[in-house]
Amino acid sequence: MGMAMKQPSGPSSGDYYESRPFTELYDEYFDRVNRYLRCRVQSTWDADDLTTVVFLKALEKFEQYSRTSPFASWIFRIAHNTYVDFMRKNRELPVDQEDFLGAEPDDTWQPERQALTNEEIRLLRDRLDLLSQDQRDVLMLRYFADLKISQVAEVLGKTESSIKMISYRGLQKLQKMYERGDSE
Amino acid sequence: MREEEKHPQDHQSDDQTVTQLLAHLKQMRGSVPVNYQLKSDLKKQLLQKMRDLEAKQAKAPIAAPKKLGKLVWSGIAAAALTLAIGGFVWWNITSLAVREHEVLKLPAQAAVELVDIDRKATQLAYINNNTELKTIPIDEELKPVTIKLPPTEGKYTGVAWSNSGKQIAVVEQVKKLSRIWIVEMPTTYSMGSSRLLKEEDGVVYSSPSWSEHDDSLAFSRSKNGVEEIWVSSTVSFQEWKLVEGSQPEWSPDGSLLAFNKAGEVQLMEMRTGKVTSLAVGQWASWSSDTRLTYTHPNGTLMEVNVSEEPFVTRELPLRNQSSEELIKGNWANKGKDLLLISRHDQPQQLVISLASRK
């Protein structure tokens, strides 16, 4: 009967309250953060290291988390900043698509998803890299971290309408690339 | 397509293809593997870090700031001086005096059970505005805590700290429906949460009292004018009726249960079930395993030693007491501190004060 006192009631509602302990939130958000970082950085090793850094930072700062805003926005702000820091320090390294998802042990793959080839994912990565930095950030947070528009806005410190527009333009551009079948 | 993806009208023709793209992205996201081995290993690492941080925080009070250190030394010096005066103030040391007046004021119509003191006398807890559980630190190192309670259409009518101080029983009354919640107090890494221990229609619950090891809760259950004391296990959720009466109060060692019946304080021996009447009065509270106090109908605090028969009751003088009418006294800190709940006439309100044996 582990009833929470007040369940999160939605990111935009005024009475949002996150009452779950850190470990429970970790269990829920690890997959999303790990997936997000694995999409963003070239090597899975780096992505996993960054995931570790994100949750260690989150634990250290957990007392500062207000709980009146969604945990998703908070943890992904840490994740995104960690990623940005990492990229700043590793600016000279090009994204090596061979490392992205390459040589991944089978036990980390869901069987039903194995039908998707790495080639398809590489292609998507190629195309995302052709977008602007803003578009890439928004689409990654929106569709790979699975954040809501309002949460992406919080993470990136932009307005919701701005995120909607960036997302829309990014999707249009991506769509055209798919239609043309190119990654140039 | 989700609402947020809807864009200007002139782009509606693109919706179909964008929808396909979104489905593709979703599929791609699902295809990115998660490192579950890392998830498991990192969790262990985080749990260890949490334990380390908690241990570190537990030690922290030892390293008091210099200023506080000076205060402590001043306190020690003052204590030494007091001891030097010796026997002259002996009665001053053993007698009970109100040291903090009006720690909290509640509306006159508020239930007297809306406030309680924890067993170590480090903080008070009370229901604020019928919406939240708040604490008032007595110990300077504690911070006040506010925990939102589940929204209610009725009223919260009582609180009771567990002996460990980690939980608080909260009673809610919604018309004829009565509930008892167990509220977990927040720690460094978890916020307060609550679980429903009991819910029953057509009854009124009140006066929860925790057993020695916090594994059971005794409470009053009133139905059709009949008051009974029930016990509910907080672990197995078993429950049983104990005796007819109200206002149960478990002795610290759990061997005795004081309660009220027909305006008298009674005592039940838990091992044998033997019930003995002690005296006219109500709101019993234990200051030790063998001593309890209760409020006489004339508003005085009475004390009785239950280990000596025949029972002899005596008035427990309270120095420095204001003119309010005492309703209830809750002991804490092994009989050194006493939470006083009194009724004030002008203006009408419940006044909470703290008394202690220095």
Image (spheres, coloured by chain):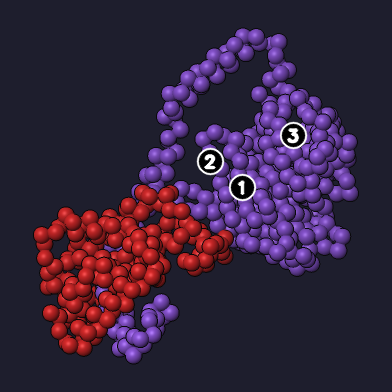
Chain colours: A red, B purple
Instruction: Answer with left or right where residue A34 lies relative to residue B348.
Output: left
Rendering coords of residue B119 (x, y %): 63, 40
Q: Is residue A177 left or right of residue B285?
A: left
What mark, if any, has residue B143 been given in the picture?
2
- Rendered residue at 88%/46% (across/down): B263
Eye-nearest disc, 2 or 3: 2
Q: Is residue B222 above or below residue B263?
A: below
Q: Residue tagged by mark 1?
A: B134
The kind of residue on which mark 1 rests is Lys
Q: Chain of mark 1?
A: B
- Answer few, some or many: residues within 10 Å of disc 3's Cα (few below 14, many 20 plus, some between 14 and 19): some
Rounded to the nearest whole Å, what is the CA distance between mark 1 and mark 3? 30 Å
Q: State the separation of the CA atoms marked 2 and 1.
A: 11 Å
**B279 to A111, vertically: above or below:** above
* Kind of element beneath mark 3: strand
Residue A76 visible somewhere in the drawing = no
The amino acid at mark 3 is Arg
Q: Amino acid at mark 2?
A: Lys
Secondary structure at badge 1 equals strand
Residue that mark 3 sits on: B291
In this picture, residue B241 sits left or right of residue B27? right
- Looking at the image, is mark 2 or mark 3 earlier in the sequence? 2
What number is the disc on residue B80?
none
Could you say where residue B302 lies in the image, as x and y percent from the top left? Answer: 82, 33
Q: Residue at x 67, y 62 (%)?
A: B152
Is residue B314 among the parts visible in the rendering? yes
Measuring from the top left, give residue A124's x and y in whole percent.
Answer: 21, 78
